[in-house]
Image (cartoon, grey):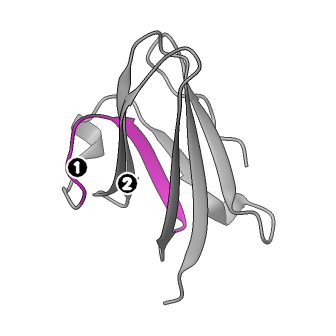
Amino acid sequence: MSTAEYSVTVLNRSGETQNYILLGGSNVLAKSTRVSSPNGEAKFDVTDPNVTYYVSTGDYDVGTAVDLSESPPFAMIDFTKARSGQTMAAVTHNNDGTFSSYEI
């Protein structure tokens, strides 16, 4: 399976400092800690065969399996819905704890 390079940005508008994780399937691929609000952002650049990613909050180590049904709210980023060649997406973590729909 070939790999692609993707970039996912999380804008922290939650009102609190957050730890963000990026998951490919159920495994943590990357984490970004102590992202401030209201103007902080976490940027994840990944080379991975996945085309669907999940962003959530939490303090997990890279490689940890996370059950999304038991995690806080999360955002799903599905690059299969992107135009050809589009490899960047952004989501916003809102002050009510939810994540916005992603923008590609």
- The answer to which of marks 1 and 2 sits earlier in the sequence is 2
| Residue 53 colored in magenta in the image | yes
Q: Is residue 35 above or below residue 77?
A: above
Q: Is residue 94 magenta?
A: no
Front-lying residue, 80 or 31: 31
Q: In this view, does 15 lie above or below 4?
A: above
Q: Which of 84 and 8 is in front in this view?
A: 8
How many numbered circles does the render carry? Answer: 2
Q: Which residue: 44% across, 43% down? A: 55
Residue to which mark 1 is pinned:
66
Q: Residue 23 carries which label?
A: 2
**Residue 20, position in %: x, y?**
38, 37
Of residues 86 and 18, the one drawn nearer to the viewer in this rendering: 18
| Secondary structure beneath label 2 | strand
User: Looking at this view, is 32 or 29 the one in front?
Assistant: 32
The amino acid at mark 2 is Leu
Residue under the image location 80 percent in, 64 percent down: 83
Residue 58 point in image, percent of width and height? 27, 34
Residue 39 location (% of width, % of height): 59, 20
Q: In this view, does 44 lie to the left or right of 58?
A: right
Q: Which residue is drawn at 73% across and 49% down?
A: 104
Is 52 on the left or on the right of 6, as rendered?
left
Q: Look at the image and give the residue range highlighted in magenta.
A: 50-62
Q: Are marks 1 and 2 in contact (CB under 8 Å)?
A: yes
